[in-house]
Amino acid sequence: MQRTQIRPARADDEERIRRFLGGLSLHTQTLRFFTGVSAPPPALVRTLLSVDERRDALVAITEECGEVVGHAMSFRGECADVEIAVVVADRWQGQGIGPRLVNTLLLRASVRGARTVGMDVLGENRRVLRLVRRLWPDARMTVSSGTVEVSAMIDPAGLFAEQGSGGTPLTA
């Protein structure tokens, strides 16, 4: 398997994101977007790449050819300081890319002052619910209409420790 790197999403990632979304299985699309997106509309692609004072977006890319194999985004939330969403290409799942994206995204958010994280997860998404329990054992989980609303505290010290240094997280 190729090595990957995580970096901030850029406007020139538009075609790579379109191919990435089109390559996701219907099951993975549904777990992330709660519906299938076989032909991703341009507005969705632009939203996934949008970075500003309220939003952040990261991509996991292969080092060899720059193929997008994961995407993570955060935005200022209503129920938490930052709400997050992550998706990893089917054949790359289970290799640690999702947790790396989450940790990098939360590290960047904590530097900007976020202290709480929230996410909506389909109840059938057992892999993500296990990840939530591992990352945030004290997370509050509320089941509502087939989804699990998750809210937890961000531990900046733990995020910096996992990053391997006290240095600055990825910058745009």
Image (cartoon, grey):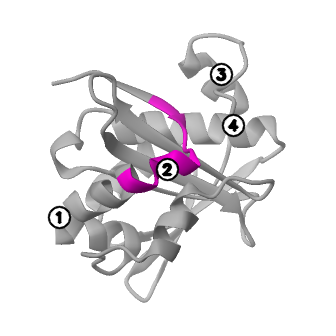
Q: Of the residues under marks 2 and 4, which one precedes in the sequence?
A: 2
Q: Is residue 143 above or below residue 118?
A: below
- Mark 3 and mark 4 lie on one chain; the one further toward the N terminus is 4
In the rendered view of the protein, which quadrant contains the C terminus? Answer: top right
Which of the numbered marks, if any, corresponds to residue 72?
2
What residue is pinned by disc 4?
108
- Horizontally, is 3 left or right of 151 in the view? left
Q: Residue at x 59, y 41 (%)?
A: 105
Residue nearest the viewer, comparing 79 with 45 = 45
Going from the N terminus, do you reach mark 2 or mark 1 first? Answer: 1
Circle 3: is it few (<14), some (14-19), or many (20+) Cα within 10 Å? some
Amino acid type of the residue that numbered disc 2 sits on in the rendered structure: Ala
Of badges 3 and 1, the one in the foreground is 1
Q: Quick one: label 3 or label 1, which is nearer the N terminus?
A: 1
Q: Which mark is residue 25?
A: 1
Contact flag, marks 3 and 4 (Cβ < 8 Å): no
